[in-house]
Every structure is written in C-alpha cells, then in structure tokens.
Image: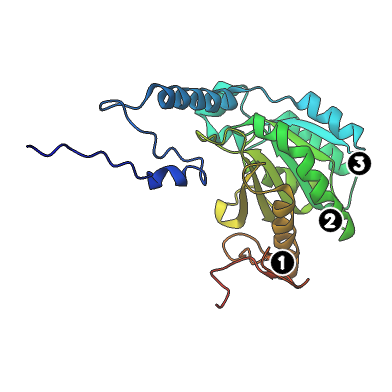
Amino acid sequence: MANTPQHDNSANPWLELRRLTPARIALGRTGTSLPTGAQLDFQFAHAQARDAVHLAFDHAGLRQQLSERGRDSLLLHSAAADRHSYLQRPDLGRRLHEDSAQRLREHAQANPGGVDLAIVVADGLSALAVHRHTLPFLARLEEQSVADGWSTSPVVLVEQGRVAVADEVGELLGAKMTVILIGERPGLSSPDSLGLYFTYNPKVGLTDAYRNCISNVRLEGLSYGMAAHRLLYLMREACRRQLSGVNLKDEAQVQTLESDTDTPKSGNFLLSKP
C-alpha cells in the first residue's frame, strides 16, 4: 500500500511574528499569487500612502488650534507654487517664496535680538502626519524648552516646504537653533509618520550632514515624550558643543522598564557595556 502524504499540522512560526511587526510576512498564497484579502489590503495601504502625499495642508485649522493654546504663528510659502511643482522640483521646496522671505525679515526687524529656537512646521510628503502629531508633540517640547529658559519664535508654518527651508527661516530670524516638524514619505504601514530635523546655527546652503533627524514619530512608532526627550538632549548638547549633525550623536539617557531605580540608563545599547 502506497504511503499517503501527511499534512504538517504544526503551527507556522511566521504567523507568530506577524503579531510583532506591521511588515507583510506570512501572507499565504493562492496558487502562485497572494490571497485576495492580502492583495486588497496592499492596495488599500498603497491608496492611503498616495492620499497622504496629495492631502492639502490644513494650515488654517492648525493655526486656529495653536491660537487656542496661546501660541502665535506665521504662515509662509515655499518657492514651489503648487503641489505639482513641489513634487517635481524638490529644490523649490527648500527655499521660501520671496514674499514670505520679506515677511519674515519684517518680523525679525520688529523683534530684534533673535531667538534661541525657531520651530518650523511643513507639510512635506504627508500633511496627514502634521495634522495628527504637531500639537501633542509641541506640547511636550515646549514644556521642557520653557523650563530650560529658551526663547522661541512664533510657530512658522511653511506650505509646500522641505527640510532645508528651516535653514532659511532660522537665518532670517537670527535663531540659534531650528527644528522642523515635517511629514515623512509615507510607507505602506505608516502614512502618518512625522519627522523632526534639528540644526544648530542654521543658514542657507547647509547639507544634511549638519542636521540631526528623529523619525517615525507617531502613535505606532516613537512616542511624543520619547521624541521630545531625544530632541532636547540634542539641543542641550548642541548648545554646549556648538554643533549639530554627524558630529553630534544621540546618546540620550532613557529610563528602561527593567530599571528598578530612578537612575536612567543609557538609551544607546551600542555604546553600553554589558
């Protein structure tokens, strides 16, 4: 009698990993293709990412919310006239439109002396991220910046802006430091990821080597409190060492769950001794 093939009824170990990551693993198959459910889920995630890129920046709503919290704001525009230009010409998103630059010069003349920190918010590649995460993150950041005695500019909103536009904003305002909150390029599992880019002594023409980046700020990623903690560490170290970028490493101390004392442990496991 021929042996009958036996089916392996043991649990698929890949299925357990799906509980730990949003990555698309262990999706199964139908013939040589994905199951219908997995394919539809992929198409839905792809549509969400595309929608996030093209979603209009609700700067009016954000300014209203900032005003309700007692924060002044300035609305500026980059040199990119519209979304199409912005996506086709990244260089235009890195500079302010001349009208906006002049408005910022006039503000600086009316408020001489500069500021310690200029806070910039730009739609970037996901206005959805800015809409969802700007206010709760700023609440954490400004609570500590006030405690440190840093002066701040009005929140500068830049429509159709890219990361480097914060350099021009900071230079025109005479800011010691700038941080820009910007929507990151959407992924298939993260259409609302917020990025933070910090620069010490900002000026037009700096490359990314002079910036520090904290990414994936969102509810499913890096928490607002942790992101603010890391940014504040970078800001304090930048003031002490008068630099930012590749020469300034994130060695912020983080309280771990395993700690049974109030003494924070190093948050960088690569630098910590066993």
Question: Circle 1 sits on which residue?
Answer: 237
Residue designated by label 3? 110
- Please name the residue shown 18% across and 38% down the image: 5
Which quarter of the figure is the C terminus placed in?
Answer: bottom right
Going from N to C along the chain, the mark reached first, 1 or 3, is: 3
Using the image as rendered, state which of residue 15 and residue 46 is in the foreground.
15
Report whether 52 appears left or right of 115.
left
Q: Position of residue 113 (x, y in %)?
A: 88, 53
Tags 2 and 1 touching, CB below 8 Å: no
Of residues 99 and 127, which is closer to you in this image? Answer: 127
**Residue at label 2?**
144
Q: How far separated are the C-alphas under marks 1 and 3?
A: 30 Å
Q: Amino acid at mark 2?
A: Gln
Q: Are marks 1 and 3 in contact (CB under 8 Å)?
A: no
Three-letter code for the amino acid on which mark 3 is drawn = Ala
Q: Secondary structure at mark 2?
A: helix
Say few, some or many: other residues with alpha carbon within 10 Å of mark 2 (under 14 / 14 to 19 / 20 or more). Answer: some
Counting residues from the start of the chain, the first of labels 3 and 2 encountered is 3
- Which label number is shown at residue 195? none
Is 208 left or right of 230, judged from the image as shown? Answer: left
Residue under the image location 72 percent in, 66 percent down: 237
Q: Quadrant of residue 123?
A: top right
Mark 3 neighbour density, 10 Å: few (under 14) some (14–19) many (20 or more): few
Q: Picture quarter containing residue 210?
A: bottom right
